[in-house]
Amino acid sequence: MGKMQTQPKANRIRKSPRGVRKIIRAFIFLFLFLVFSITGTLFYYYSSSQTVHDAIQVALSHNYSPAEAFPGKDEVNILLLGRDVDRDRHGRIVNTRGRTDAMLLVHADFRNHKINILSIPRDTLVHIPGHRGKRRISYANALGGPSLTCQTLEEFLGVYPENYVLIDFNTFEKAVDAIGGLEVTVDKQLDYDDNWGNLHIHLKPGRQVLNGNQAMGFVRYRQSKSGDAESDFVRIGRQQELLRAAKAKLSNPCVMLKLPHILDMIRKDTETNLSFRQMMCLLSFAKSLPQSNIRMETLPALNTGGIFVKADPEATKKLIYDMFQANH
């Protein structure tokens, strides 16, 4: 008789019904654990954070669209302000409105799918309503906050920003860190130390990702250790490069998912008359545009150096029309 053929050992192994049931129960337990954990976390944030509460409401109703966020408006003007801090004679921060170190007037054109951004040097001489003579435009916030700054711009440029966002340096750093930094090209060696203002800038040239503190130094740098100074226009160029880096970062889906948390984190330290829905709408709108549809310009000036900046009246009038009024 021939030898009996036996099945391979692997084919003879069978899982018992009891073992299968254990695996199924473990899987169901793990699934339910994850569901309850996620639900509990969302409930906690939903109940404890107004921003996340708003984010969930907006996400569920799909109200990121300009038609929902800005009903009846095809375009809006927004003033973005970066605020400096004041210190006493001992170098301690004092509670004041502070001067603005960065000023950008933004025109969002929803109908034509464009954004225009005008950078205004902080040392631009203007008349501030209610005050005699001419002063640096950066003092408008110190004298009367964002509302007075908006009035000053209306008198100076003929453009009134319906909305504004005022952010301080620390909040800016937190926001940059929260999105994982920004990738820019540092144009040259940047070294500067100001112990009084707690500003320490040490950046090497080249393409690199900057964290919050480094990004702040990148946009605030004006003077080297040797005393060589740069004009506000050079610094504005760096500010605009950082904006382009932020626009590129928004294309990352993970960053967009973090935005509700980031807005919640910086909300208490940001002064704005925009609602959460409107802020998310503007960020989503900027994300949707190709870089070619975002125009960045700097206020035309008669002088590009020195202590004060004087606007070129004719060139400014033409630029303002092109960027803010041509589509009316």
Image: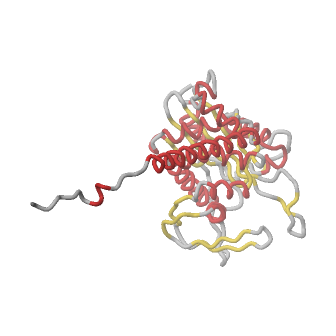
- Residue 77 located left or right of residue 91: left
Q: Residue furthest top?
A: 72
- Residue 7 located left or right of residue 273: left
**Which of 193 and 59 lies nearest the eye of the viewer?**
59
Residue at 76%, 56% (x, y): give it.
84
Write down the quadrant of residue 144 in the picture.
top right
- Residue 117 located left or right of residue 138: left
**Which of 175 and 140 lies nearest the eye of the viewer?**
175
Q: By what rule are the colours in the image chosen?
A: secondary structure
- Residue 8: x, y in percent? 24, 59
- Residue 58: x, y in percent? 63, 32
Q: Residue furthest right?
A: 89
- Residue 289: x, y in percent? 48, 39
Write down the quadrant of residue 88 in the picture.
bottom right
**Which of 297 and 221 lies nearest the eye of the viewer?**
221
- Residue 221: x, y in percent? 65, 65
Residue at 64%, 46% (x, y): give it.
37
Quadrant of image for the C terminus: top right
Q: Residue furthest bottom?
A: 226
Residue at 65%, 66% (x, y): give it.
222
Q: Residue furthest left?
A: 1
Quadrant of image for the N terminus: bottom left
Q: Is residue 238 above or below residue 113?
A: below
How many numbered dots are placed on residues in this image?
A: 0
Residue at 70%, 48% (x, y): give it.
81
